[in-house]
Image (spheres, rainbow, N blue to C red):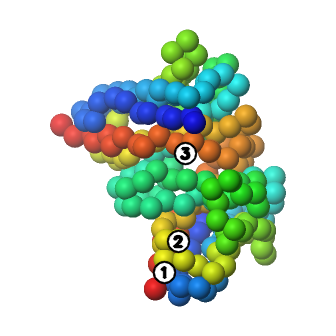
Amino acid sequence: QTVVTQEPSLTVSPGGTVTLTCASSTGAVTSGYYPTWFQQKPGQAPRTVIYSTNNKHSWTPARFSGSLLGGKAALTLSGVQPEDEAEYHCLLYFGGTVVFGGGTKLTVL
Amino acid sequence: QVQLQESGPGLVKPSETLSLTCTVSGGSISGYFWSWIRQSPGKGLEWIGYIYSSGSTNYNPSLKSRITISVDTSKNQFSLKLNSVTAADTAVYYCARVGRYEYSPYDYWGQGTLVSVSS
């Protein structure tokens, strides 16, 4: 059973920078896993913010960026705003099946 | 603007079958992959499976023996059946559009529907 691991929680100050990561139990994450990042606020459905490692949707704020970092997928928020407080989920594609990470609760404090 | 809406019973008895339908509006179901995802209370997201508009499917190995996802292109709907449910299947169930490819970005989601398993 493949496991995808994220930090359970992170805290960042307004205006700061934070990096969330997404690791696979199978080894290094590459672009072939099409890492996707979702933002979910309480009571709402998830919304994609980054797809295929580093691509943004039209609604994705410029301060969000995706990358591969040290064998993991990474989501970096630069110049964090209070409205970025949310749960962030990563998704990895394993050639036909999909696994979500456990989610990272990001607190802006 | 593509919109998705889940529908189905909010309460299912243990050992029975959970049945949900996702109705797609504002766009065609044809030519896309569509998925079901669930989220147990206070937990992370769990991928259930996806279906292409042609009817080909891929399921979560841990649920594969209990699930069936089907599509009705004439109604612009796709459906989920999960049998032999237990309390562990209590969750908010979301339907989502994956995209043109199975690794596409899940760009549209339904609002989610809470299904509780209880006698």
Q: Disc 3 versus disc 2: distance between alpha carbons?
A: 24 Å
Q: Which mark is residue A108?
A: 1
Of labels 1 and 2, earlier in sequence is 2
Quickly name the residue at label 3. Answer: B47
Mark 2 burial class by Cα count in 10 Å: few <14, some 14-19, many 20+: some
Instruction: Specify whether A89 is left or right of A109.
Output: right
Q: Position of residue B42 (x, y in %)?
A: 37, 61
Q: Chain of mark 1?
A: A
Mark 1 and 2 residues: CB-CB less than 8 Å, in contact? yes
Q: Which mark is residue A84?
A: 2
Q: Chain of mark 2?
A: A
User: Helix, strand or loop at disc 3?
Assistant: strand
Q: Is residue A54 above or below residue B97?
A: below
Q: Which mark is residue A53?
A: none
Q: Is residue A61 visible?
A: yes
Which picture quadrant has residue B35? top right
Which picture quadrant has residue A51? bottom right
Q: Which residue sits at x=67%, y=72%?
A: A63
Q: Which residue sits at x=53%, y=85%?
A: A14
Q: Is residue B61 above or below residue A56?
A: above
Mark 3 and 2 residues: CB-CB less than 8 Å, in contact? no
**Which amino acid, by three-letter code, is at mark 3?**
Trp
Q: Disc 1 versus disc 3: distance between alpha carbons?
A: 28 Å
**Which amino acid, by three-letter code, is at mark 2?**
Asp
- Report the front residue among A109 and B68: A109
In the image, are marks 1 and 3 on the same chain? no
